[in-house]
Amino acid sequence: MKRLQQFLVLVATALIIATGTAQAAGRLADFMARAGPGELVPGADRLGPLRGDPAIAPAFQGDRLLGFVYLNSDFANAVGYSGKPIQVLVGISAAGVITGLKLVEHKEPIVLVGIPEKRILDAVNTLIGADISPVARGTGGAPQVDIVSGATVTVLVIGDSIVRSAIKLIKSGRIGGEGGALSSAAPAVFKTVDLSKSEIRDWQGLLADGAVRRLYLSNGDINQAFEKSGNAAASARREAGDDDDTFIDLYAADVAVPTIGRSLLGDDGYHRLSARLKPGQHALLLAGQGRYSFKGSGYVRGGIFDRIELIQDGNSIRFRDRDHVRLGAVAAEGAPDFPEIGLFVLPADFTFDPTEPWSLQLLVQRAIGARDKAFLTFDLGYTLPETLIRREQRATTVSEPAPAPEPAAAAPDGSMTSAATEEPLWMRLWRGDTSRIAVVALALGALTLIFFFQNQLVRRPTLYVWVRRSYLAFILVWLGWYANAQLSVVNVLTFTNSLITSFSWEYFLSAPLIFVLWASVAAALLFWGRGPFCGWLCPFGALQELLNSIAQALKVPQFRVPWGLHERLWPIKYIIFLGLFGLSLYSTALAEHVAEVEPFKTAIILKFAREWPFVIYALTLLAAGLFIERFFCRYLCPLGAALAIPGRIRMFEWLRRWSECGSPCQRCGNECPVQAIHPEGHINVNECIYCMHCQELYFDDQRCPHMIQRRLKREKRAALASTPMPGGKPPATLITAGGVPIGSRVPDAIAPERT
């Protein structure tokens, strides 16, 4: 038995090793079947066996070699907004010319939810035909992709990964020339950061020896660069101010190097940063002034800095908010007062050699229309000063890897100093969005007052109708079309997925309006169920109801679904939600695709500016809503179903009913806009959108049978009270025991004595 266990362990170990090896060298093989040889290398009719690691596949026409195929992410960083690699099959000739591209896998949210994938492909395909050999030799500039507004980072990541992977492949000598590998016993010089040097220098001293590098651009420089770009629309627009005004004055330094770190961060800041860094990990300090921000706004929208990119030896990375720490000042003596300073920690899994040259690429954008922008890039080159590098010469072999860069010295204390700490990103986002948050808070406060004083409001039907329609118009136009704060079932799936994987409040707090809305919806579930959101705060629901109101005003016939059919149709949305939820446990990206059953993105977020199938689908649902009020809400909305499930725990029942409701009276049930009232008279809170129409009827003594009866009795009593009896005597029922009519003044002579 023991031998069997040992044998199984050995087999399992072998399988793990084999699987790991296959995955390391077999990622290209996983995607090769998704494109034909001729799509990537024109004229090729077959691909040969994989070569090397990372793998490349030769492409043949018969026995003639035409080029090679490889996967971009095997050679260069290709991580976009999603945090996952964008996989592109690349065809390249033996001479280093890109011959074909095929996007085979991505998880980019902007492409999943709105930007047509064809626009992304059209932009990236401009690289086909580009000769990368001069770029690899350093005699030419890297080709640039066309930028797609709204998907800047995604397109840049794809384009950069294609170009840099091609550069790396060419430099490796595997195509288009001889390799540059070391001979088996060739002496090699290994460079590491000299940790023995840690003196503190002033700002001018750091600039003088290149420990801090600078990129200065004036307004005139930017204007000239756009003129040379050949983009007439971009060159026609000029930067505000004089040509000599500073556009951006940008500085960069590697503060994981002791001398530089101690000088720029101070002793405490450097030591605490060092304690935070893992072995071999580095951090950059970036400081800027001028009218152009190097941080931009991309990291506010999606947690990524879209204007700066670190590039070294074919690898590139764009920083995310989790890599960023805002600094208040630079500690070096004589340093300017920069309005914008950031500390960026390189991810531990990013290959970075501080002793080799690297560059920081700055993306400059210029608006050329309502939605279109033109882009240029400028490089800030950086090389660590020789005085801070230690060199060691020794023999090595081609298979022997160079030693990893030594980590910066660590300090015993482990917390960040005040100079290197900052308030959380979500706090800055909230502070920067205070005006819109205030508007949402006021809208939610107004809705709360509507609900708490609903009885007083619904007693005035005309006022109530105008309040409701005005509120829905605000939700549609401002909250939906302007602020794009449309909640989605994708938010529910993301939240549950984060609970299973790695939950972080900061991720959800980074979208202030969405967070405020979800918090209010969660609170409303305890009081009223799903109704406050579905009936009042959903922009698409508001669009449906307002369109139906217009249809009714135009005498469009309304179709009332028979109760038996209606009762069997409303479970469809629960089935859709459960299917999406189960699918999200397998693949969140796939669930996001299927969640297009919601037309919210098309009708609200993108305002129908999308491919025709999505537009037709959304318009079809809205057209159905002209005849059946809130058709989508009733039968198809997975978000409504997701909210209805926890909505069952509500603590209060604020919708009033009479004992006659449902038996025999059916007035409320017949007039409920979404048929949420059962024939028996009770309200199904799972389907109720809290429009309060039934409450309007509840108090109406002209339409509600119960209230009509009460009104008639009241009128009868009033009539009897005002009708005198024969002989001029008042009715007996109006005579007191003392013989004085009720309501008359008691004479002083017979009034009881006051004591």
Image (cartoon, rainbow, N blue to C red):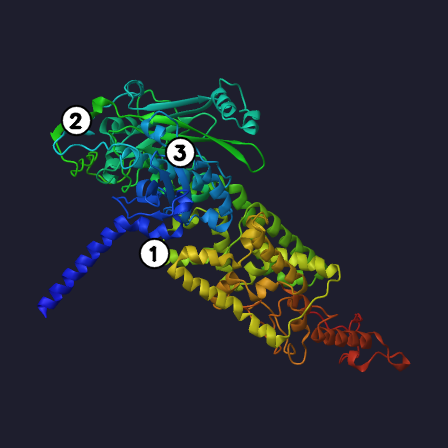
Under tag 1, what secondary structure?
loop
| Residue at which label 1 appears | 501
Q: Which mark is residue 673?
A: none
Q: Mark 1, mark 2: which one is toward the viewer? A: 2
| Residue at which label 3 appears | 308
Pointers 3 and 1 in contact (C-beta within 8 Å): no
How many numbered dots are placed on residues in this image?
A: 3
Vertical placement of 259 versus 33: above or below? above
Q: Amino acid at mark 2?
A: Arg
Q: Amino acid at mark 3?
A: Ile
Q: CA distance from mark 2 to mark 3?
A: 31 Å
- The structure residue drawn at horizontal position 50% and vertical position 39%, both measured from the top left corner, is 148
Under tag 3, what secondary structure?
strand
Q: Quadrant of the N terminus?
A: bottom left
| Residue at which label 2 appears | 391
First along the sequence among labels 3 and 1: 3
Measured from the top left, where is residue 49 in percent x and y? 28, 48
Under tag 2, what secondary structure?
strand
Give the image quarter of residue 419: top left
Report the side of 735 relative to 179 (left or right).
Answer: right
First along the sequence among labels 2 and 3: 3
Label 2 packing within 10 angstroms: few (<14), some (14-19), many (20+): few
